[in-house]
Amino acid sequence: MISRTYRIWRFFCAWLVHIIFFVIPHGRENEPDIGSGPYLLCSNHISAVDPVIICDSVKKQQPRYMAKKEIFSWPVIGKIVGWLGAYPVDRAGRDAGVILKTVKMIEDGMSVGLFPQGTRRPGVDPAGTPLRNGTGLICSKTRARVLPVYIRTRGNRRRFLRPVHVYIGKPIPYEEYTSDGEFAGDYRHITEYVFGRICELGREAEKGKKKRKDA
């Protein structure tokens, strides 16, 4: 499901985002077609503009992101995340309502983007960062397939005029991340499994880069 506002944003602004942030997508063929139903897009988190970069990289659907409410008051970025269909969450409290809203959005046919790390973790290896189990909870409640995405930059930091590589992996079905239902209620296991697949994309990208250098 793609909103009219999002279509307009993509038509007029996506090319500019692509140039400004020097986005280089890989694996676009792995994104599910819109007619095949919604997905949960899960990614590592480096900077505040990650949702914008990801939305530039996927073409077939519109992943809507939960974003801390403060972002909506930021100049420019606040407007952009609103156009992308982001919705606010109060990270200072237990915003159970945002979980219910996310589940309802998936049930209504909307794709949603999540960051299992919960917050930005620049300058460090994502594989060693703590995770929040909300991803596993939402996966378990919706039974949605997960589209793993890895954002790779030099030193895992966003720098002006440095390329951002976005790797889109193959979708992970519910049966896989729950081991055919064995871990259906184990939110930690699901979160760790999904994020493990995300980090695997990063490791494969690094191996490919090394092979090209050695060739």
Image: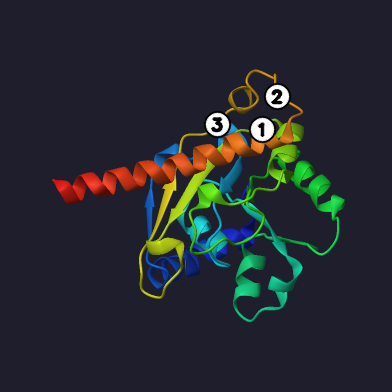
Nearest to the observer: residue 96 or residue 190: 190
Q: Nearer the viewer, residue 167 or 188?
A: 188
Q: Residue at x 65, y 25 (%)?
A: 178
Q: Are marks 2 and 1 in contact (CB under 8 Å)?
A: yes
Three-letter code for the amino acid on which mark 1 is drawn:
His
Q: Earlier in the sequence, mark 2 or mark 3?
A: 3
User: Which of the numbered marks, if any, corresponds to residue 189?
Assistant: 1
Q: Which residue is mark 2?
A: 183
Q: Which mark is residue 172?
A: 3
Q: Earlier in the sequence, mark 2 or mark 1?
A: 2
Mark 1 residue element = helix
Q: Residue visible at 36% across and 74% down?
A: 161
Q: Distance of mark 2 from mark 1, alpha carbons?
A: 7 Å
In the image, farthest residue toward the front: 128
Q: Secondary structure beneath disc 3?
A: loop
Q: Residue at x 41, y 63 (%)?
A: 155
61 displayed left or right of 23: right
Q: In the image, what residue type sits under mark 2?
A: Phe
Q: Is residue 25 above or below residue 47?
A: above
The C terminus - image quarter: top left
